Image: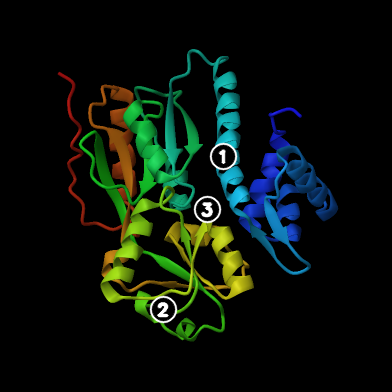
Amino acid sequence: MSSAVDLRLQYAAVALAEELNYARAADRLHITQSALTKQIRELEDQVSVALFERDKKHVSLLRAGEAFVEEARLAILHSERAMYAAKSCGEIDLRSLTIGRSPYVWIEFVNRLFSIELPLYPQLAIQLESAFSPNLARSVLNGSIDLAIAIGIPEHRGLTTVELRRDPLYVALSPTHPAVKQESVYLRELDGYSWALFARNLHPWMYDSILAIIRQERLQPRRLLPITTPHEGVALVESHDAISFLCHGSLEQLGGRDAVFKPLADESLRFSTSLLIRATNTSKLAESFARSYIKSIRRKDSIQKEFSWDLPFQKAS
């Protein structure tokens, strides 16, 4: 048996893990449900272990599936990077920036990247990479990407972090939950339910902040269910009457789902969306782009205004 797994099968596993529903996952992949079922069986035969548990009504991800899907996402990301790299070889005269972004930031922040015009770089090309915030911070630090838009990144002496927006954390609730009639919800009002929560390695700020309130207020959620995407969390709300935690930007991706979204009122559960650049950055292009981007964001009335207007780049000696 070859150790290499077809990328097509990895896409199938990721889609099913995020949707936890064969019909929705098949529709997302533009294939039939029977074709998706065949691909998942082929994948499980290749890896010689069950990745999903399913019956006539429910699909759930087993521990082996969680491990596989986490690595599959990285494989898909590297495949996309390889295609970008190949294409860029034919554009040797074109200046470019590689910018990372969390998949759950506001889409407005991503769209605005492509509206920036720099007179000194009229043919500037923007290459986007998507990854979870901790990975983005590491990539900025090691220089593999130039800038990043990330969520919940703590201060780090190697990073210049400029806050773009501050938002409450949100929860996805079943339409029958008593709290759906409220404008906002405190975490203690959700005690006793199962909580779908991003694994710590994916969103350490979110995980640690929620665990701190659990300890402080002696809450007793029924279970903590690890998830890797908002889609997985909402699927658990729909199928298991769980509570799922998500960032504001995720709401744009979840239209049409059978869940109600409410902001959390706990002040300690407000998170920052920030632009990251290496503190020892020496690229005039990256610095110029960052300054123009931040000014563009701050001109929008809908964006929070309590910022320091100076961008504290460390100048190269």
- Kindly identify the amino acid type of the residue bearing the numbered disc 2: Asp
> Looking at the image, is mark 2 or mark 3 nearer the viewer?
2
Q: Vertical placement of 137 versus 281: above or below? A: below
What residue is pinned by disc 3? 228
Between 232 and 191, which is closer to the camera in this rendering? 191
Q: Vertical placement of 28 versus 140: above or below? A: below
Residue 160's spot in the image, x, y percent? 24, 37
Q: Which mark is residue 160?
A: none
Q: Residues within 10 Å of mark 2 (few under 14, many from 20)?
A: some
What residue is pinned by disc 2? 191
Left or right placement of residue 93 versus residue 150 in this view: right
What residue is pinned by disc 1? 71
Numbered disc total? 3
Left or right placement of residue 258 versus residue 296 in this view: right
Left or right placement of residue 169 versus residue 250 in this view: left
- Kindly identify the amino acid type of the residue bearing the numbered disc 3: Thr
Query: Mark 1 and mark 3: span between their CA atoms?
Result: 12 Å
Q: Residues within 10 Å of mark 1 (few under 14, many from 20)?
A: some
Q: Residues within 10 Å of mark 3 (few under 14, many from 20)?
A: many
